[in-house]
Amino acid sequence: MLAQLFALLPLLALVSATPIHKRDGTLIRSGRDGQCLALEGLPGVQRYGLVKNGTPVITRDCLGANTWFINRGSGSITIPGTNFALDIGLNPGNNGALKVWESYPGSPQQTWYLTDDNRIAQTGGNQCLDEGDNGVQTYQCTTGNTNQVWYIDDNSSAPTTTVSPTTSSAAPSSTAAPSGNPFRIVFGNDQCLLTTGSDTPDNGTPVVVAPCSSYGAKYFTRVGNQLQLSGTNYCLDAGTNPHDGVAMKLWQCGNYPQQQFIQQGPLLVTANEECLDVKADEPSVLQTWHCSAQDPQQAFTFA
């Protein structure tokens, strides 16, 4: 993918962007830590019209972040209601800072490409948006670098989607997820879902697989088709565009298709006909993968 991206970047400015934003824009959320792209100094800098050339762009909690206009494909990333665009500068390089500048459509420092695998790359360059240890920066686009994964969220009015049923020849599991009562989601004989990091969940908290006896093994409650962490308002979440290899996390529960998990036998099916899946060669990793009724890595029970 990366080699293909580098080969195409000089030509991407010619590609028509596909609109994906709402009238009021969308949040741009880091796949690494769940923080969102934002102007420094919010809310005052935007409320009082203080946005100017050079206003820094950072990442922060999504509830306090501004929205952006961004299109799938090549084009500018702009702030709704202003004439300012995300700007990489004239000499971009690793660990570079980001800012906004008066919008000049077509200028190389303001032209970005949102890829199908959720990278935001400078069109004609080799730099990507990267969520480093100290926040957002520019860094050379690198295959497998999860710091460079970004999701486009319309959290104010998330669409509702019915997950398409997956054809299955497997016999339905005899253990259905109980509704209303806490339960553990179990893989194999003794592997359960648990969260990493702080005991207090937050948007973007990773969900992994570990022995059920481990400290931190979690109980969930089924609310409709959502799997909600018991005692919280956080749900199992597959990201805004579920596809093969997306790591699972918690996110504040909402009417989002990526939080719908329909039980079909041992499978838990979410949006885009992806299933909950334990990575075969890294069995602590909980991810999404295209559904296969015969795949033992996608067989879950409830206890």
Image (cartoon, grey):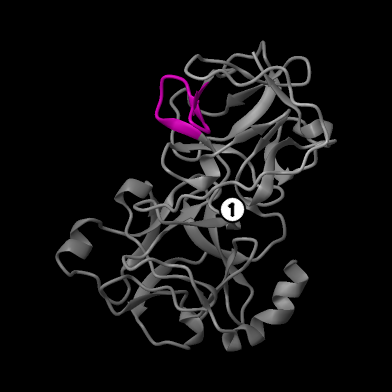
- Specify the quadrant of the image occupied by residue 301: top right
* Amino acid under disc 1: Asn
* Residue 165: % across, % down: 67, 44
Specify whether residue 90 is in view: no
Q: Which residue is mark 1?
A: 147
Number of disc labels: 1
Q: Quadrant of the N terminus?
A: bottom right
Picture layout, residue 238 above or below residue 300: below
The kind of secondary structure element at disc 1 is helix
Q: Position of residue 6 (x, y in %)?
A: 71, 76
The reply to whether the magenta stretch includes residue 232 is: yes
- Residue found 33% across the figure and 70% down from its top: 79
Does 207 sit above or below residue 96?
A: above
Question: Residue 209, percent across and down?
Answer: 68, 26
Horizontal side, residue 284 vs residue 293: left or right: left
Instruction: Give the residue furthest to the top.
Output: 213
Nearer to me, 289 or 110: 289
Q: Is residue 60 left or right of residue 121?
A: left
Determine the image quadrant of residue 300. Answer: top right
Assess disc 1: are there few (<14), some (14-19) or many (≥20) residues with their C-alpha within 10 Å of its C-alpha: many
Q: Position of residue 23 (x, y in %)?
A: 33, 68
Q: Which residues are magenta?
A: 221-235
Q: Main secondary structure of the magenta part?
A: strand
Residue located 19% across and 69% down the image: 50
Q: Which of the two residues, 59 or 205, is positioned nearer the viewer here?
A: 205
Q: Is residue 202 left or right of residue 45?
A: right
